[in-house]
Image: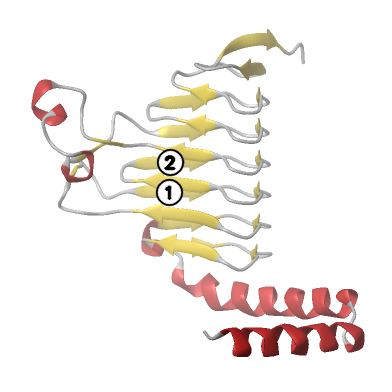
């Protein structure tokens, strides 16, 4: 786009800023998101009432995704489920999200095997949850470029009810997070933790057990 056209669009936007105030613009964005949510909902294997996704939501493999009631996601969420020949798989993949799950900005959920997220789970911004790697850690795989290695799942990821996942957390394959747990910001979770755990660190460790 030429500089003249770029400047033209800038000044058009500048002029409209005096006419259309920010609150009105936010209302337009909200209406767009409701339309977008309605457009996406039929594509899923299952999707409960109250589904709300802010644009954009990147979806791959929606036919393998089940979502409960009152789901919400902020912009730039990626939910990607792959059923590909270039993967070591036993069954078809499954990604299940329970009721009242909230996903904040820039999160990525990746699945080739099984990812289960329970009810009332809060996922903060920039969280990464995956059940797979690009290849196993062995001499044969290491000799291949990472992008060409077979996608491999070490095991399912299960996040039980009422879990709060802090900003920047990474949850790796073959991990179960027990109910009522809290995961601190930027933790890298490589093993399972029991219910009522407060988790943090790289790699993540048990900081405290909540007395409930």
Give the farthest residue toward the left: 140
Q: Is residue 45 visible?
A: no
Residue nearer the viewer, 25 or 54: 25
Q: Quadrant of residue 32?
A: bottom right
Depicted 210 relative to depicted 66: above or below: above
The residue to which callout 2 is attached is 115
Coloured how? Answer: secondary structure
Provide the residue designation for mark 1.
95
- The reply to whether residue 178 is in sight is yes
Which numbered disc covers residue 171?
none
Say whether residue 131 is left or right of residue 1: left
Q: Position of residue 27 (x, y in %)?
A: 82, 77
Compared to residue 195, the image places residue 112 above or below, namely below
Task: Quote the CA–CA distance across marks 2 and 1.
Answer: 5 Å
Q: Position of residue 34 (x, y in %)?
A: 69, 75
| Residue 9 falls left or right of residue 48 | right
Residue 88 position within the rendered picture, expressed as x and y whole percent measured from the top left: 18, 40
Residue 129 at x, y percent in the picture: 47, 38
Q: Secondary structure at mark 1?
A: strand
CA neighbours of label 2 inside 10 A, class few (<14), some (14 to 19), many (20+) = many
First in residue order: circle 2 vs circle 1 = 1
- Residue sitting at x 67%, y 49%: 102
Q: Please report the residue visible at 49 percent of the width from the left and 74 percent of the height from the top.
A: 42
Left or right for 83, reference 196: left
Q: Identify the image quadrant of the C terminus.
A: top right
CB under 8 Å between discs 2 and 1: yes
């Amino acid at each position: 786009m030429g500089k003249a056209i770029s400047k033209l669009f800038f000044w058009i936007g500048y002029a409209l800023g005096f006419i259309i105030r920010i609150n009105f613009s936010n209302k337009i964005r909200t209406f767009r998101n409701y339309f977008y949510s309605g457009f996406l909902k039929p594509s899923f294997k299952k999707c409960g009432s109250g589904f709300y996704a802010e644009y954009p939501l990147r979806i791959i493999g929606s036919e393998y995704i089940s979502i409960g009631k009152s789901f919400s996601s902020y912009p730039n969420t990626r939910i990607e489920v792959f059923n590909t020949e270039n993967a070591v798989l036993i069954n078809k993949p499954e990604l299940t999200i329970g009721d009242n799950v909230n996903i904040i900005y820039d999160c990525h959920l990746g699945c080739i095997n099984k990812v289960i997220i329970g009810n009332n789970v809060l996922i903060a911004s920039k969280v990464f949850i995956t059940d797979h790697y690009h290849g196993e850690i062995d001499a044969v795989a290491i000799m291949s470029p990472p992008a060409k290695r077979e996608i491999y799942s070490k095991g399912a990821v299960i996040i039980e009810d009422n879990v709060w996942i802090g900003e920047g957390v990474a949850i790796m394959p073959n991990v179960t997070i027990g109910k009522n747990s809290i995961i601190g910001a930027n933790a890298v979770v490589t093993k399972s933790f029991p219910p009522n755990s407060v988790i943090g660190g790289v790699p993540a460790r048990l900081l405290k057990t909540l007395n409930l």
